[in-house]
Amino acid sequence: MIPAYIVAIGDELLYGQTLNTNAHSLSKMLTDVGFKVVKHISIADERQVILDTVEEMSKVAKIVLITGGLGPTKDDITKKTFAEYFNVGMRRDEEVLKHIENLFSSRGREMTELNQTQADVPTNCKTIPNALGTAPAMWFEKEGCIFISMPGVPFETENIMEKEVIPRLLEFFKPPFIVHKKIQTISIPESILAQKIEDWENNLPSDIHLAYLPHLGKVTLRLTCEGDDKEKIETELNAQVQKVLPLIEKYVYGFDDETIEGKVADLLKEKNLTLGIAESCTGGYTARTFTQHEGASKFFEGGIIAYSNDVKIKVLGVKLDTIVKYGAVSEQTALEMAEGVRKLLGTKIGIATTGVAGTGGGTPEKPVGTVWIAYSDENETVAKTYQLTKNRNLNIQLTTNAVLNLLRKKMIEM
Amino acid sequence: MIPAYIVAIGDELLYGQTLNTNAHSLSKMLTDVGFKVVKHISIADERQVILDTVEEMSKVAKIVLITGGLGPTKDDITKKTFAEYFNVGMRRDEEVLKHIENLFSSRGREMTELNQTQADVPTNCKTIPNALGTAPAMWFEKEGCIFISMPGVPFETENIMEKEVIPRLLEFFKPPFIVHKKIQTISIPESILAQKIEDWENNLPSDIHLAYLPHLGKVTLRLTCEGDDKEKIETELNAQVQKVLPLIEKYVYGFDDETIEGKVADLLKEKNLTLGIAESCTGGYTARTFTQHEGASKFFEGGIIAYSNDVKIKVLGVKLDTIVKYGAVSEQTALEMAEGVRKLLGTKIGIATTGVAGTGGGTPEKPVGTVWIAYSDENETVAKTYQLTKNRNLNIQLTTNAVLNLLRKKMIEM
């Protein structure tokens, strides 16, 4: 096992002003190729803290990925602190300088003195190209431990990792395989799931590790095993999956990195169906869940965000009477929205959401968290209701999950 | 300065399967009341690693917040490892048990043996109620250092922090004040910004710390100062803001935690305007950016997600001729979409996005990243184009930012 550590440098992380997404994406990339991530650390832009952390890491790690502190401004001190740690000076890297010049001229922007200093690096490092930005990554070696310093900007760093760092690390080390097999479940609580598979879990071989990962009404079961014979491990994990599956089949929507929206998208494309979405309380979030992924245009025609009653009536054709009699958050309104959007956009399927997302807007009869969702095709239009939480964004996400699961079930029945 | 450390426990973090949002939100809460967050650490669900980390923290920290590993299933070992560290046994907490029973009966769900074990805690801790979940938080003391163990589920932990932990910590310690003042800028690169304010930056008093935080085409300037006299610090920081402002005024959209969409929302409400959105390439993201915040219904009437050409024509009234002659990604289509949605929804203002988000769909004339946005009110309809990146989700976010900035500028002109 080749231990890897991920260090993020930046005051903004410790102040809670920036979310550290790099530790997450870098860990996934390292794990996928068999390195073992042991620890994430976030520290301040402070000389002594950086020096102490690098020294500590050099004693336990084989790989240390460092993100952040490479910007052109005065608060960024990672480069000069590394030069101090290794007791070397700085040099201007001509290749990096050329890359920065090209980047600026292709964007038609003026280049400053500050930008040029981004080509300055400690003399003992190899530079690694940063195709999407001005700060290069740097590769340092010390007694068999590799330190790689990268920018803090997530899309730059992810690109550098994928294109440059991972291939170089695989050349340098020969990692064992860590294999994960994941089972994705929905609408069953973690504790009930654990009960259903208790006997199976107790009989798992000791080299297979099981974890429950709950997330917004979904629970991922993750099986993990490590070794040199990738094929053998995979066969063993797949056999365990086949054993447990019959116990929980109706809650399983997918495997590994499949998402519920990805599964629904696959089913829609497979059955040659088109989708229209009418959203009130989810305000665009449900459509966005589909459109964040490439290829949504193959089944998703469009959506109506009917935030006001006026739009529900004028665009979706909900009857004024329905809203007056039952309210905008009601079974009847949800049904008319789903049918309305299906007919308006000429899709095979229409879905709708309407509810009190919160934080305000609740009444004694319809408190915050009251939600109606509906599904409509040429044969039927049905609705379901939920009493969710007091948290606005949680309610929006849970409503979207409920719609996705309803869609999935309807597709499977077809 | 009262040093605080945040420790996250969970294999899923190190595998890159779950993003650690707790470190972010907990840091913000601690910083806001004057504690100094020194380090974030994420480690595995492993007995020895947890024991070593807790021991290490006890030597340097005054406050250690630990998240994760409190679930009811076998992979969660935080509680028993804490009992081992403090060399104590476990007890069943009757109050917590009653809370769990109430939670299950109110949700109409069956309670399992496993759920009951969530009321078991080390004998030396005080339990802290978790209103939104079954696992209680735990307060341990050791030689003036406070350890607080909380669940990994973000909305549960944030609620526990706000309602229970922060008040107790403020009672226990008397923290100094850390004051931040932020200036939010848009559409100016970090290096140009640094040039414009260079003289001012060089003359900052040594106890005021300046940071540049770039994020998706926006740069936050953050001034930080620490001390006991909150009012004096604030006066000093405000004076510095007033000094720098004239140098960069036209790029500044707000201060402190103001967001660009929040600023636009305020301007729309102030001027009594209503908004309709027509989205193609952003697929609901722009509407979602507004509707994630409470009160969007005060100005946001609704949106049309016109993903297919059919919906652009049938619902928004874009002319078939326009699409045939210029394409869906064109100035003409963007203009007709913005005007179309304004008229359809009867709003004062309409905005539109259309572009090649990617990853696929690019052509030599309109490569991935080509985007048109448009703005329409009763006096004018105008469009702007951008050549963005190769990254789909980045393009969607940058397009939304461009629309927001266009809206902001138009509001200010009015």
Image (cartoon, coloured by chain):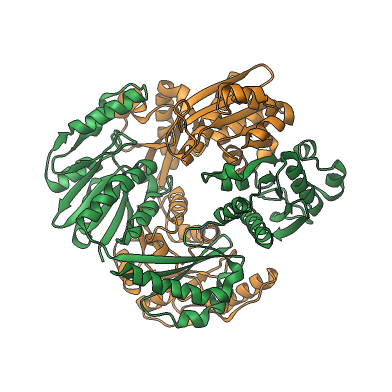
Chain colours: A green, B orange
In front of the other: A311 or B34: A311
Relative to A13, is B99 on the left or the right?
right
Q: At x 32% / y 23%, what residue is drawn?
A: A105
Q: Name the quarter where the C terminus of chain A is drawn.
A: bottom right
Q: At x 57% / y 36%, what residue is drawn?
A: B262
Relative to A140, is B81 on the left or the right?
right
Relative to A334, is B132 on the left or the right?
left
Relative to B236, is A1 on the left or the right?
left
- What is the quadrant of residue A12 in the picture? top left
Q: Is residue B238 above or below residue A218?
A: above
Q: At x 69% / y 19%, what residue is drawn?
A: B378
Q: Name the quarter where the N terminus of chain A is drawn.
A: bottom left
Q: Position of residue A357 (x, y in %)?
A: 67, 50
Q: Position of residue B43 (x, y in %)?
A: 35, 64
Determine if residue A413 is in view: yes
In front of the other: A4 or A256: A256
- What is the quadrant of residue B194 in the picture? top left
Q: Is residue A281 above or below residue A106?
A: below
Q: At x 79% / y 35%, what residue is drawn?
A: A314
